[in-house]
Image: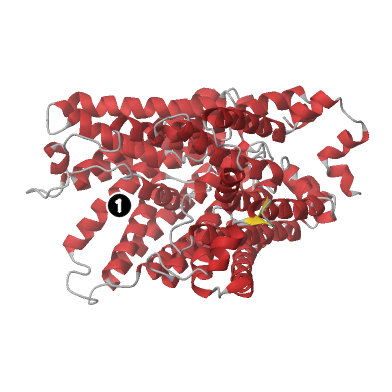
Amino acid sequence: MSAETRPGTPVRPADTRGSASGRGLSRLDRDLRNALVLFAVSIVLIFASRGLGPGFGSLAQIKAILLISSFVMVVAFGQQMVVLIGGLDLSVASMMTLGGILAFNWIGDSSAALVWGVPAILLVTAAIGACSGIGISLLGVPPFIMTLAMGIMLYGATLGFTQGTPTGAASPMLSALFAPTAIGVPMLYLMVLFTLAGWFVQTRTAFGRRLYALGINPTAAYVAGLPVRRLTIATYAISGASAGLGGILLVGYVSGVTLMMGQSYLLPSVAAVVIGGTSIVGGRGIYPGAVAGAILLTTLSTIVSSLGIPEGWRTIIYGAVIFVALVLLRDDLQHLLGRRRRKPGKD
Amino acid sequence: MSVEAVNPRAGAMLRPEPWYRRMLGDGTTVIVAILVVLLVVFAATQSDALTQSVLTDILNNSLPLALAAAGGTLVVLTRGFDLSVAGVVSLTNVLVAVHAGDGPLGALQGLAVAVAVGALVGAVNGVLVAYWNLQSIALTLASMIVCSGAALLVLDAPGGNVSDFMVYDLTDRIAGTVPVALAVGVGVYAVWFLLRRTDWGIRLYAVGADETAAVLAGIPVRRTKVIAYVLAGICYGLAGFMLTALTATGTPNVGDPYLLLVFAAIALGGTSFAGGRGGVAGSMLGALTLTLLQKVLFSTGVSSFYTGIFQGAVMVLAVVIAAISARFSSQGEARS
């Protein structure tokens, strides 16, 4: 039975084959293939939507889709890192709101304040994320509960400190990231850079590789001498920082802030990670997959909502896509598709 | 091989532990202690705290969450997560608001619809998790989203028509003494009390504690899981039904807060998210605690803005206390 492998239980055969016998590369190939398929599906969807109405499949629409998906994409980076080690970060919504409120309040409409403001905000959100990590790794609180409680506390704190109405202004420099210039929209370049950087960190640095090891088998990682606690704390700090960054960027895009602004990004951040081929029990998945997942979800909801379909059906389609992705990513189906993979034994 | 061989509690049953170890090792003790403290503070800060009407009000307000948390607990005991609760509560809420008729018979009809829909969603979740090996968090995330979409199709704005019987009689006291909410809560617990003594109940704990061992012991793991998800869905449907009576209206996104609150209640109640340990009573008391906490914060004059900070802190505290106290009991050491 491999339904719910959690840290502490023996790993599935697929995982051990992937890591122990030097087949790591082929596993990455599979993840990359999934990511590319998702990108392709997004492109096909966009082109298929041509002719549905004016503006469908236009360059402007593609740009808009990419810009809207950038927030999910940034938040999903941290979420994915946490999922890679077998955790889950439910505090990203409140963390994103906090990042946005701080950007609104500390940076305001000053461009000079960006220089210290952005690093300061990222530091604050990383520190709060690290607190979750400490609770999880030192106190042994389950990630689900720790980040849920942290999210609830953060929401209460931001509500209390702002007394319900955040004050400040949106920085024009942040807004400029989303405005078209002679060479294109700056944010689009940042997205590409961010994707490559995230991918690099995961697959080409010791830190990244250790996260996979930790996710595949925490006990083995500990026995192998990995600093499991420090890795866990650092991962949740990264998740906090990337959710904070998502909040800062969102302030630039919408030029305003609300106390609920992060709420609508919690589930999409998990969904993008899941659709992108990341195993929710950890140890498998790469960032380009999550980026592709974010773009696919945004593409789909953009097209569907511009068709004038009632919101109920839009939501159902959204859920159905996650479901289809899950079924297609099933281990045994992947094994059937993969070369030289035998079917998993009866379970 | 007998079922007891894989039941971690079996050893403890054969050799009774000292009462203090049993008390400390049981997650429910922590939640009862917190509840008592909150009640004392509440009684001290609000003069009418212990009157029948205030207590009935608190029970009414916490019942839907308690029912939903009871359902969620069954899935958590199998080491799964069921996020579909938010969608099912919303969906059954609007369905009951639209389809329930007048009087007790009409309410019964609404109840039937709610329970049937909950059971259906639970069955789909359970079959896909148990037989298709889909990851429960991811799958139930999808089914939650689909259910909230369906809720929007039934009612795209708050509305519906809830009968007087549901609004007044179901939130009242039976014969002027026992609150209906208490009766329903105790009734659901009684069912659980009996169920956990059946083969299925024992298997549920075995599956959550060690699935591989359960398979080797010949336990029908998949069927056990499916039943857990179906019963959970039925509880969510009940929660949606009672919520409709409480709010007297159908609101398509009314279940959204339940996504997080249910897990908060389960954590408070001392059910282990690693599966196999805990129970429904703790979760229901956890739901009561969350509701009472809000009342206490209000009565002690804490700004409602800060409610969240306290809720989160109590959650972490409860889990940490439960973990520490579990170390005192041998049962806790064995499971660690």
Q: Quadrant of residue B16?
A: top right
Q: Is residue B246 left or right of residue B108?
A: left
Q: Quadrant of the C terminus of chain B?
A: top right
Q: Position of residue B265 (x, y in %)?
A: 59, 42
Q: Chain of mark 1?
A: A
Q: How many other residues sit within 10 Å of disc 1, few (<14), some (14-19) or many (≥20)? A: many
Give the vertical position of A208 relative to B327 (above or below).
below
Residue drawn at x 75%, y 61% is B223
Q: Pick whichever, B285 or A50, lies toward us.
A: B285
On the image, which quarter does residue B303 sit in? top left
Task: Give SS at disc 1.
Answer: helix
Q: Where does the image place residue A221, in percent across and percent down from the top left?
A: 60, 29
Q: Give percent across and percent down for residue A302.
A: 29, 63
Identified at 44% across, 37% down, the residue is A151
One can see residue B273 in this view: yes
Q: In the displayed structure, does residue B315 sit left or right of residue A94? A: right
Residue at point 33%, 73% (across, down): A309
Please indicate, yes or no, whether residue A11 appears anywhere in the rendered image.
Answer: no
Task: Please give the residue where the numbered disc 1 appears in the rendered image.
Answer: A69
Tell me how the rendering is colored.
Answer: secondary structure
